[in-house]
Image (cartoon, grey):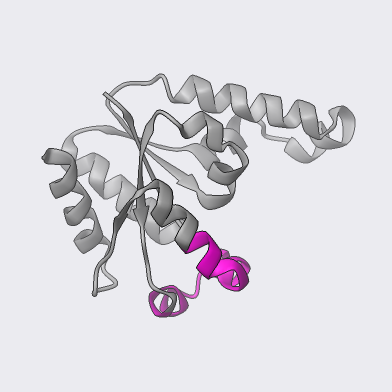
Amino acid sequence: MKKKVIVALADAFTNKVAKMVANDLGLYFLNLDDYLDYNLFDSERILAKCGIEYLKKQEAKYIQDALVLDDMIFYCSYELMINNINLFENCEIIYVALSKEQLTKLREKTFEINELAFEDRDVFLKSIALSVENDFLVEKSFANKIVSFLKK
């Protein structure tokens, strides 16, 4: 069975959605960004002392280690996914496709960073993932849609 990875352009909102999906399906949840922060707790120092190539290899190692875990729903930020896209080739990627208006309402820092590139990133994620959209900006509504799809 393919690993399930949930991604979006709004980290905090989508992290909550992914946790709800895992809970509703009786699965474990792992935020890959937090997992890397924990395992590479001083990444700035690693980068300064060992260089970008070493840091990227370490990131890839920890992502690969995590993706062998069973009974999991993973959350991954857009940046982490795009920087390691080859590691997610055999995963089922689910994109919480919030509209630009919905992202603006959230006022998340991640969207402020992504706003300039929103359209390109949105088109890219829709091309590689199952896109889940919802008229209502409610975490549980998005989670329910994802759970319904995954139960099929």
> Residue, x 85% and y 27% (percent of image)?
50
Total numbered labels: 0
Residue in view at x 80 percent, y 34 percent: 52
10 or 42: nearer the viewer: 10
**Of residues 63 and 118, the one drawn nearer to the viewer in this rendering:** 118
Residue extending farthest to the right is 49
Q: Left or right: 98 with respect to 21?
A: right
Above or below: residue 14 compared with residue 5: below
Establish if 74 lies above or below 132.
above
Q: Quadrant of the C terminus?
A: top left
Residue at 87%, 36% in the rendered image: 48
- Asked if the stretch drawn in magenta spans residue 62, the answer is no
Q: Can residue 10 be seen by looking at this rendering?
A: no
Q: Left of 19 or right of it: where is 48?
A: right
Query: Image point 38% across, 73% down: which residue?
Result: 99
Query: Residue 81 at what x, y percent from top left?
Result: 53, 43
Screen quadrant of the N terminus: top left
Q: What secondary structure prevails in the magenta region?
A: helix
Residue 113 in view in this figure? yes
Residue 103 picture quarter: bottom left
The x and y percentages for residue 138 are 26, 68
Query: Quick check: is 121 in the magenta stretch?
Result: yes
**Left or right of 1 in this view: 116:** right
Magenta span: 101-122
On the image, which quarter does residue 110 sit in?
bottom right
